[in-house]
Structures are given as structure tokens and as C-alpha cells.
């Protein structure tokens, strides 16, 4: 199967006519071909977006909302096909794609379609002399660039607010996971989205992504991906004074106090560690446990990790699938080796896994739990982004706050204790943009989402996302 770009409302082959192989990571074999697009394809997309902008930006909010709601409905109607595509592209369990990725993509459209109906602006009365009112206007053409781990979920998390705000888009999914973005084009056409409003250019980051970021007509860049890529993007976009939203990497702490609800904590800490093969920016990969329950926690955590069913992602009972690509598989394995070199003791996993049958050449790594590493070693400081976690004991609250805050990242944390006062006090001191108390990945789309430090700049979600895609203009009237 040869995929295509979605430009000006129709599918188009890349101008270069060249393609990249798209590999099913559970099988280790090529199953489709992705356009290897270039700056020329991006230029076509920009022209289409420019032509569409005058009409789309003036389309009444109620009409934009109606089209976005239709897209949400069509995503739900095509759940099976989209979930299969997501699972095949990423190696994630089909059940996860069905229960999390695709429903969330529909929810993203639904959420911003209805939000736009309730937006408001401010007015400031200046004594008796003037009236100021603030307009929010769509910023124009925007670039949306997303990663491979939650492909349609994160792609639509950017696209939906941009469309709701009245912007026209040039978007790029990861070339490792192009399929659901490809299918989204047809859904948008069916839903009545005018041609040119959303353009999807497939291909490599250093060609297509770079051309989007550097294009002078594109006013804002919403990017989710690695910190090094985010830094590069900022270096290109900032001197052009583009608006930037950067959602980057994480190295998130799970902090377990002795007075936690033990069963619930272990169960959720395992889920937080290994969901999507540990390839979620919010996964808790450093687990700090109060010393008095360290051994008990370790035993229960290992038992539940070993009980996870790893195998063919297409099998509905599979809980852990394959790592997304051969390159990422080797990266994760290299960190397991590093952990050993740093003195880590592998408690379970630590090896590749052979899945018999059609998946025997797939990129599977057994969920890995490591202990005996200091908080400041590389294994505990660098983002691995795989099914690898470390367990570390702590004695005092001050000590665990220091450990938790010791990395360059500051995306998410979860804190486990039944002592509410302690929970709030610790939460206030953790340097993360998203903190869960006695839960993990419990999301309300109205809340601000994003990271501190090297985990990013800006917030997505709720009004913050809509605001990002708008220009704010104050108008002062002398009375
Ligand atoms: P990358 O940074 O490698 O890639 C992200 C996207 O950027 C891809 O589409 C990529 O294309 C593109 N890209 C690469 N180089 C450039 C460039 N020079 N200019 C413009 N675009 C470019 O991240 P991954 O895809 O490897 O995703 C994993 C990372 O994403 C992890 O660090 C993870 O923590 C982070 N992440 C953060 C989240 C958050 O909300 N904070 C959520 C999910 C993931 P290509 O695929 O061709 O390289």
C-alpha cells in the first residue's frame, strides 16, 4: 500500500515520487510505503492553506463546530479500522488502541467543537473615559508536528483546537506512524471540511518538519516530541518570532509513601510504568518507595509486572506489544546495558522477547524492573521512553522531593499517600506541570497540560489550546 499526502482536500503523491518503507514493528517487516515528501510538497500545502484561510477564518463558530463534531462521529464510526491501523503502525495492543487512542482522538474533536461555542473575550472599562475590548482572532496558518507514540491521539490534540480557532493547518505525523493521519484526510473530506483547511504532509522530520517550521507564512508551531528536536525547532522558529508550543520529553517520578492504599498503588504504578510499552511521555519510570514498605512493594510490583501478557498486538488479550521501531528497540536495550554498567540489578525482564509465530522477528522487550541505582546516574536522569523502570527507596519527604526534582525534565508526577495534607505539600514542591495524587493519566481536557524545565514551553488543553491558535488584539475606545 502506498500512502499519500492530503493537500487541498485530496490525496496526492509526493512531488518527488519517492517513498519510505513503513514497518510493522510486531512483525519486523514492511507493510506500506510513506511519501518521502520535501519542501516542495510543504509549499503546495501552504498555498492550499493560504487560499482556504479567508473563508475558514470567517466561517461562523457554529458551522466550524458542526464540521468538527461530524469528524468526531466519523472517527467513532471507524473505530475498528483506525484502531487496527494504529496497532499495526506502532506495535501497541489493539485493545489499547480501541479503548484509549481512537476514542481520545474523537474526544479531542468533540471537546474543541463544543468549546468554541462557549468562548468569550474580555472588556475593561477605564473609569468613565474609555472602554477596552479584546478580540481573539485566528492567528493564520499553523504547523502541527506530532510523534509516534500516540499518533492520532496527539495529532488531533493539536489539529482540533487549531481548526476550532479558525486556523488553517499544515501538519506532519511521525513517518514511523503515518496511517491514521492518512485515514483522517478522508474522514475530514466526508465531514465537509473545506479543501485546504487541513493539509497533511507525510515524511521525515528533517525535510517536511523542517520546511514547516522554517516557512515564513506559518505563524505558529505546535510540536510534541523529543527535547532535542524541540530545542532545534525553537532555534529555527524563535528568530522568526513564531508562536511556539513545545510538549517535550519526561522522566517522571512515581512517589509511594508507606501510608498509601497499597493494592491500588501497585496496580496503578505498574500501569503507569508499562502502558504502551512505557512509550508515553507521562509514564512513571522512576519509582521512589518509602523504605519501610520497599520490599513488600518490590515483591508485589514484580509479580504484577511478570503477569502482564506480552505478545502479538493484534491479539485482544495482549497487554504489552512491540517497541515502535528497530532503532528505538536498540535504544531501549542500550539503556538496559547502561543500567547494568552503572551497577543496577535487573529484577525482571532485561531481555528481548521472542514471540512465536508471525511475530518472531518483532521488536519485543520484556518489561524491565531495575534496582540498586543512585538517583543521579544516567539511567535515572535520561529519558528511556521504553518498558524500563527503576525502584529506589527513600527515608524522608525532603529526600524524595530532591530525587524527584533532580532531572532536567518536569512533565508529570504521581504521588501516593492517604495523608491529604502531605500529598498537597509534596505536590506543591514537585517541579512538574502535571501532578496526579493517588491516580495516573486521569485526564480532564479542560485542564492545562504541559511541562516545566526541559519538558516544554506552554500549555495545551482547554482555553490555553484555543488561545495558542489565536492572536489577541485590544481595542480602546475613548468615551
Ligand atoms: P521526535 O522529536 O524525534 O519527533 C517528533 C516529531 O518531530 C516527528 O514527527 C519528527 O519527524 C519531527 N521532527 C524531527 N526532526 C524535526 C525537525 N528538524 N523539524 C521539525 N520536525 C522534526 O520525537 P519522537 O517521535 O521520537 O517521540 C518521542 C518523544 O516525544 C519523547 O521524547 C517523548 O517524551 C515525547 N513526547 C512528549 C509528549 C508531551 O506531551 N510532552 C507526548 C508524547 C511524546 P520524524 O518522525 O520523521 O523524525
Image (spheres, grey):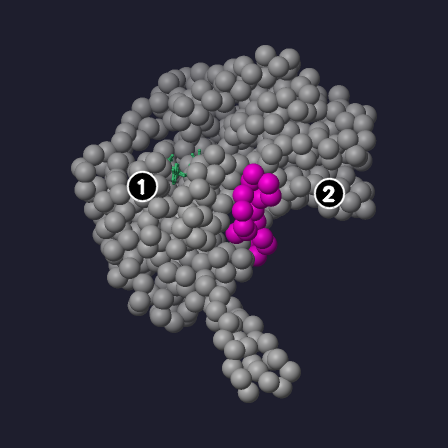
Which residue is rendered at x = 59% and y = 76% of the image? 124
Which residue is rendered at x = 64% and y = 42% of the image? 432
Residue 378 percent coordinates (x, y): 59, 22
Residue 113 percent coordinates (x, y): 45, 62
Q: Quadrant of residue 55?
A: bottom left
Magenta-drawn stretch contains 355: no
Question: In the figure, is residue 434 to the left or right of 17?
Answer: right
Instruction: Report the residue marked by disc 1.
Output: 208
- Which quadrant: the C terminus? bottom right
Is any atom of residue 71 visible in this view? no
Per the rendered image, the range of residues in magenta is 444-460
- Which mark, by number, is residue 429? 2
Which residue is rendered at x = 47% and y = 22% of the image? 331
Magenta: main secondary structure:
loop
Is any atom of residue 457 visible in this view? yes
Q: Vertically, is 109 above or below 324?
A: below
Ligand 1 under 8 Å from disc 1 Cβ: yes
Residue 413 percent coordinates (x, y): 65, 39
Q: Closer to the N terminus: mark 2 or mark 1?
A: 1
Of residue 262 and residue 65, the one placed in the foreground of this image is 65
Question: In the figure, is residue 231 to the left or right of 382?
Answer: left
Would you call the spot at circle 1 few (<14 residues within 10 Å), some (14-19), or many (20 or more)? many
Residue 289 percent coordinates (x, y): 73, 28
Q: Vertically, is 142 above or below 472?
A: above
Residue farthest to the front, as pictured: 239
Magenta-drawn stretch contains 459: yes
Secondary structure of the residue carrying tag 1 is helix
Secondary structure of the residue carrying tag 2 is helix
- Which quadrant: the N terminus? top left
- Looking at the rendering, the quadrant in which ligand 1 lies is top left
Which residue is rendered at x = 63% and y = 21% of the image? 377
- Which mark, by number, is residue 56? none
Amino acid at each position: 500500500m502506498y500512502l499519500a499526502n492530503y493537500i487541498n482536500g485530496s490525496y496526492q503523491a509526493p512531488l518527488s515520487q519517492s517513498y519510505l518503507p513503513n514497518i510493522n514493528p510486531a512483525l519486523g517487516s514492511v507493510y506500506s510505503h510513506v511519501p518521502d515528501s520535501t519542501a516542495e510538497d510543504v509549499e503546495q500545502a501552504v498555498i492550499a492553506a493560504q487560499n482556504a484561510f479567508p473563508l475558514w477564518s470567517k466561517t461562523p463558530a457554529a458551522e466550524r463546530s458542526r464540521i468538527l463534531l461530524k469528524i468526531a462521529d466519523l472517527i467513532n464510526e471507524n473505530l475498528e479500522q483506525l484502531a487496527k491501523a494504529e496497532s499495526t503502525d506502532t506495535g501497541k495492543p489493539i485493545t489499547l488502541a480501541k479503548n484509549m487512542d481512537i476514542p481520545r482522538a474523537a474526544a479531542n474533536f468533540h471537546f474543541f467543537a463544543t468549546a468554541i461555542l462557549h468562548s468569550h473575550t474580555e472588556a475593561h472599562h477605564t473609569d468613565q473615559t474609555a472602554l477596552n475590548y479584546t478580540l481573539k482572532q485566528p492567528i493564520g496558518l499553523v504547523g502541527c508536528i506530532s510523534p509516534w507514540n500516540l499518533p492520532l491521539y496527539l495529532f488531533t490534540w493539536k489539529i482540533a483546537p487549531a481548526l476550532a480557532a479558525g486556523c488553517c493547518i499544515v501538519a506532519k505525523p511521525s513517518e514511523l506512524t503515518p496511517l491514521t493521519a492518512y485515514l483522517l484526510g478522508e474522514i475530514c473530506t466526508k465531514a465537509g471540511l473545506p479543501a485546504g483547511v487541513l493539509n497533511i504532509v507525510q515524511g521525515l522530520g528533517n525535510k517536511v518538519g523542517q520546511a514547516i517550521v522554517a516557512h515564513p507564512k506559518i505563524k505558529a508551531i505546535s510540536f510534541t516530541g523529543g527535547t532535542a528536536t524541540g530545542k532545534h525547532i525553537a532555534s529555527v522558529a524563535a528568530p522568526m518570532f513564531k508562536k511556539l508550543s513545545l510538549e517535550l520529553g519526561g522522566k517522571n517520578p512515581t512517589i509511594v509513601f508507606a501510608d498509601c492504599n497499597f493494592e491500588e498503588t501497585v496496580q496503578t504504578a505498574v500501569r503507569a510504568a508499562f502502558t504502551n510499552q512505557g512509550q508515553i511521555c507521562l509514564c512513571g519510570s522512576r519509582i521512589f518507595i518509602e523504605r519501610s514498605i520497599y520490599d513488600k512493594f518490590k515483591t508485589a510490583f514484580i509479580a504484577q509486572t511478570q503477569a502482564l501478557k506480552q505478545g502479538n498486538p493484534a491479539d485482544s488479550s495482549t497487554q504489552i506489544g512491540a517497541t515502535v521501531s528497530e532503532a528505538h528497540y536498540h535504544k531501549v536495550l542500550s539503556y538496559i546495558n547502561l543500567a547494568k554498567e552503572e551497577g543496577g540489578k535487573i529484577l525482571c525482564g532485561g531481555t528481548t522477547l521472542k514471540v512465536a509465530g508471525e511475530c518472531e522477528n518483532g521488536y519485543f522487550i520484556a518489561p524491565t524492573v531495575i534496582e540498586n541505582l543512585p538517583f543521579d546516574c544516567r539511567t535515572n536522569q535520561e529519558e528511556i521512553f521504553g518498558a524500563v523502570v527503576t525502584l529506589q527507596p527513600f527515608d524522608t519527604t525532603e529526600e524524595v522531593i530532591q530525587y524527584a526534582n533532580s532531572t532536567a525534565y518536569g512533565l508529570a508526577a504521581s504521588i501516593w499517600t492517604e495523608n491529604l495534607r502531605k500529598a498537597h505539600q509534596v505536590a506543591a514542591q514537585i517541579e512538574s506541570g502535571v501532578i496526579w495524587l493517588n491516580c495516573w493519566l486521569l485526564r480532564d481536557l479542560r485542564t492545562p497540560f504541559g511541562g516545566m524545565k526541559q519538558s516544554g514551553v506552554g500549555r495545551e488543553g482547554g482555553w490555553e489550546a484555543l488561545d495558542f491558535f489565536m492572536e489577541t488584539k485590544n481595542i480602546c475606545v475613548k468615551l
